[in-house]
Each structure stands twice: as structure tokens, then as C-alpha cells.
Amino acid sequence: MPQVVFRDYDRAALDREYDNRAKVKDAPEWLERYARESAKARAEISGRLDVAYGPSPGETLDVFPAPGSAPAPVHVFIHGGYWHRLDKADFSFVARGLLPAGAAVVVINYALIPTVKMAELVSQCRASIAWVHRHAASFGGDPRRIFVSGHSAGGHLVAMLMSTDWGSEGLPADVIKAGCGISGLYDLEPIRLCYLNDVLALTSETARLHSPIHHPPSHAGPLLLPVGALEGPEYLRQSHALARVWSSRGLRCEAVEMAGHHHFSIIAELEEPASDLSRRLVRQMGLA
């Protein structure tokens, strides 16, 4: 009988839970769509591309200023790819869903594992928020209204940012007003125990250290956790478990299962301003 490695899963079953490309047979077509629609977005929308926010080649971001003249809320998006794949250039399309409401959009990159370890990757994302706070006014953004969202591994990074002690970083404690983790990963222990760890090289200590489920903040803005209803049980558990932990601390956090969506379709909602997910983020920024 196969050995159970996590909850009720043996290694093969746990691998299947987190192998999104195997679960969604047309995953390559979705990834091609991201790249194609992002290239169109960059051609259509005036932006500042590949702006350095840190010293390493991976620490860059793309800025898409808000269409209006008044200081606008800034929405920072963090891409996924299990911390070792993909690029901000694949996700420029998120600007299409949020710019029309009057938000500025910033899409960040970070150095990928194994070039860096998880601790450095998280530190770079924190540095990107510090850069946005310092430079928001230069692209018409309001540094007092910074919001973050991310997909998959990017959702994990959103939760890590929401749990950061920003005062120790020299920034306002509430520098991030609200966050949204889209089909995110908040408990890294099953990640450590499945095939992904062949690349990520997490130990039990580093997995726990970087699991938001174990480190809820003492105070934070609202956190929304949309997850595709067609995701497997583990992805659903991840979002609902973090929502329970935050709510037990009196923090505002809601997990929402989005009907009809799998891991790759849910983020494509941000291509359209009228989509459910775009409207949720617009409301979160106070623009609706």
C-alpha cells in the first residue's frame, strides 16, 4: 500500500493535486493566451516597462499609469508559476481589467528559484512595494492607496506581503490597503512533499517560515481569496484554511469559490473590466 505523506494523500496523489498543467488539458493554450493578450495590452496601453526596483536583473516592474489626472489608487499584480516559472510580460493583460476604473497598475517580476531561495524572492517582492510607495507620485499614483493581487504562487506572495511588519521596513504599517490572492498557496508543507520540491528545495523549517497560514498578521487590510471552483480539493483547502485563520484573529478575509473556473481560466477574468473578478478588485479599491 502506498505511504501517506500529507493528510490522506500518498506522493502520487499529492503530485496530481498540484500538477495544474496535467489537471487542465488545454493549459498550454491558456499560457499562450496570456502571452498573446499581454502583448496586445502593451501595444494598446502606454506604460513604462522594465523599470528597476532593485539591483538584480529579476527586480523589474512594468507601470501602466491610470487614465485620469488625479492621484489614483495603485494596483500591484504578482504573477505565479510556482516561484520558478513565467514572467511579468505574460500578465500585462491584467491592466485591461483595472485601468478603465481609474487605477494605475504595476506588474512586478522577481528572481526565480533556483536563482534565489524563497526568502530572497519574498524580500524582493517587499522591495517592490517599497519602490511603489516611494515612486507612485511619479506615475500619477497615490502612495496612500496601494493594493496587491497575485495568482497561484503570486497569491502566496500577496499573503506574505499582507503579513509583513512594514514599520520595520520603514514604511507605514498600512502601506497595503487590501489584497487579493487568486487560487493561491498558503500552506507550503504539501508543496515541500510533492514533486515541486525537486526545484524549490524547501525544508520543513523554510516551508513553515514561508507559509502564511502559520503567520497571520496582528492587523491588516481586507484580504479576498477567490479560487476556481473547478480546482482540486487541495487548492480549495488552501484558500478556505487561510480565511479561517485570518477570521479567527478578527481579520477581514473571505474565500470565494468562483463557479466554472479552473486554475488557468480564473485569472483571465482580469482581461475584462466587466468580469466578476475585475469588479471585485475595483470595489476593493473604492472605485465602484
Image (tube, rainbow, N blue to C red):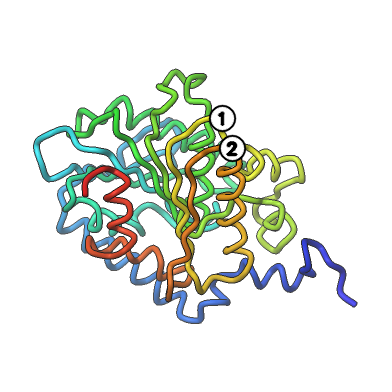
Residue at the spot of label 1: 218
Is 89 situated above or below 208? below
Mark closest to the chain's N terminus, 2 or 1 = 1
Relative to 216, does residue 182 appear above or below in the rendering? below
Q: Is residue 274 above or below residue 105?
A: below
For image coordinates 47% across by 72% down, the residue present is 262
In the rendered structure, the answer to whether residue 210 lies left or right of residue 109 reads right
* On-image quarter of the N terminus: bottom right
User: Based on the displayed image, in which of its 4 quarters is residue 37 positioned?
Assistant: bottom left
Mark 2, residue position: 249
Label 2 secondary element? loop
Please say if the residues under marks 2 and 1 sit with CB atoms less than 8 Å apart.
yes
Near-viewer residue (46 or 134)? 134
Disc 2 residue type (three-letter): Arg
206 left or right of 238? right
SS type, badge 1: loop
Taking the spot 39% from the left edge, 63% from the top edge, the residue there is: 267
Mark 1 residue crowding within 10 angstroms, few (<14) / some (14–19) / many (20+):
few
Q: Position of residue 198 (x, y in %)?
A: 70, 58
Name the mark on residue 142: none
Q: Nearer the viewer, mark 2 or mark 1?
A: 2
| Percent position of residue 154, x then y | 48, 51
The residue sitting at 47% across, 54% down in the picture is 225
Q: Is residue 10 left or right of residue 118?
A: right
